[in-house]
Structures are given as structure tokens and as C-alpha cells.
Image (tube, rainbow, N blue to C red):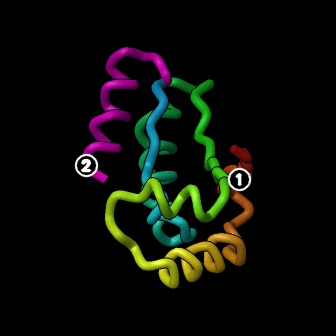
Amino acid sequence: FLRYLQALHIAVLRNKPVAVFVDNTNIGAVEMAPYIMAFNALVLPIIPDATLRILQIHCDMKVALSRQEHNVPHSVWLNMQTRLLSEQLPPWFPQIQVICV
């Protein structure tokens, strides 16, 4: 979260939006909320046309498992996928944009 705040600070100092990516373990509304609140509080007052996006990247599970770096068991991935697909985000959150690769 600290690196996210630092990236937002840089964007505000430059008065220019930057792309900031938060890893895939922050998949629930409760976990996303601090990032969204920080963006709304720190960036929007300075850069009103900045946009916050929530991206969901879909790819083949076998490919994703083969690329992982932390040896997360397949069962944990399946639980995360189920949670991600069933999570109902509050209406004031940005709409999820799905990207298929």
C-alpha cells in the first residue's frame, strides 16, 4: 500500500495521471477500498480528470499457474477465482473492466 501511495504522490506532483497496478491478491471490496479511497482523496482534488480502473484479466488457468512466482497451490487459486467471480462490489466502486488474454 505504501508504494501505491508513493505512486499517487508522484502523479500529483507531476499533475499527470500514472498507471499504477495493484496485485491480484486484493480481490475483495474490503481489500480494494483503501486504494480507492486514497485515489479519491489524494488524486482527484488535484487531477480531476484522472481515472481509477479495476481490471480483471482472464487467461487460461494452466498458463497462469505456470507463470506464478509464489508456488500458490491450485486449490488456493480456485478459491480466489470463486471469490473474485462472486464478489459484489459497492455501486460507488468503478465498474470492473474484463480483459481476456
**Res 71 quadrant in image:** bottom left
User: Is residue 90 magenta-colored?
Assistant: no
Reading the image, the residue beneath label 2 is 2
Q: In which quarter of the image is the C terminus?
A: top right
Q: Which of 9 and 77 is in front in this view?
A: 77
Instruction: List x then y, in percent, for residue 67.
Output: 45, 54
Q: Does the CB distance between marks 2 and 1 fall below 8 Å? A: no
Q: Could you give the CA–CA distance between mark 2 and mark 1, rounded to whole angstroms?
A: 23 Å
Percent position (x, y) of residue 28?
55, 70
Task: Name the mark on residue 96.
Answer: 1
Q: Around disc 1, counting alpha carbons within 10 Å, would you say few (fewer than 14), some (14 to 19), or many (20 or more)?
A: few
**Residue 41 location (% of width, % of height):** 45, 44
Left/right placement of residue 31 relative to residue 48 reads left
What residue is at 68 percent from the left and 54 percent from the top?
A: 58
Q: What stretch is highlighted in magenta?
A: 1-17
Looking at the rendered structure, the kind of residue marked 1 is Ile
Q: Which amino acid does label 2 sit on?
A: Leu
Of pointers 2 and 1, the one earlier in the residue sequence: 2
Label 1 SS:
strand
Residue 16 covered by magenta stretch: yes
Q: Residue at x 59, y 40 (%)?
A: 52
Identified at 39% across, 73% down, the residue is 72
